[in-house]
Image: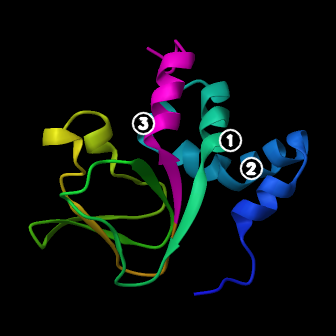
Amino acid sequence: MQRIFDENQILDDLEGDIRKETTLELYRDVVSKVTLFNLCETSTQREVCYRLGHLYKTKGTKIFDESERSSAIYIVRFGVVSIMNKKMEIMRAQRGDLVGEAGILGLTPNENYGFTAMAETMCELCVLNVKDFQDMLVQIPDFFRV
């Protein structure tokens, strides 16, 4: 499927400060809704925004499978994602919900996703890859406020 424009490419073409401010403006609202990131300082939330990519999924499209090794955390920006375990729906994720974090946080066997995520409607997802998440945990000592 060919897209009319590619937001990632547009952002990549912007100069440093303009790219950062645009990225922050695009993602700040949804990052602030994520419970995990509410525990972070504002500067850390900004860093999360800078590292996000995005992905579109059409209705009925699989986002990831329970047997796949966790490679990213997804934040639902728009749409509804069905979370299933053995083909039975266990929850629906909506705007601001985090999906796929269990394997990355070591809550599933073998660091797999542990459940399947399907787009129940047309979805836009913000994507934070494992390496970026792990790098932030190491580079930002006070990642979580306590």
Residue 139 appearing in the image? yes
Q: Quadrant of residue 120?
A: bottom left
Disc 3 and disc 2: Cα gap in Å?
A: 20 Å
Q: Where does label 3 land, which residue? A: 36
Q: Is residue 131 magenta?
A: yes
Q: Where does label 1 land, which residue? A: 50
Vertical placement of residue 21 versus 90, above or below: above
Q: Name which residue lies at 70% across and 61% down.
A: 8
Q: Name which residue lies at 53% across and 36% down.
A: 132
Check the picture and name the quadrant holding the N terminus.
bottom right
Amino acid of disc 1: Tyr
Q: In the image, which is nearer the foreground, mark 3 or mark 2?
A: 2
Vertical placement of residue 144 versus 11, above or below: above
Q: Quadrant of residue 117?
A: bottom left
Residue 108 appearing in the image? no
* Mark 1, other Cα within 10 Å: few <14 / some 14–19 / many ≥20: some
SS for dot 3: helix
Left or right of 78 in this view: 21:
right
Looking at the rendering, the stretch of residues picked out in magenta corresponds to 125-146
Residue 128, image x and y in percent? Answer: 51, 46
Q: In the image, which is nearer the foreground, mark 1 or mark 3?
A: 1
The numbered mark at residue 23 is 2
Q: In the image shown, does 37 or 109 lie closer to the viewer?
A: 109
Amino acid of disc 2: Thr
Q: Is residue 68 magenta?
A: no
Asked if marks 2 and 1 touch (Cβ < 8 Å), the reply is yes
Amino acid of disc 3: Leu
Left or right of 2 in this view: 87:
left
SS for dot 2: helix
Sequence-wise first label, 2 or 1: 2
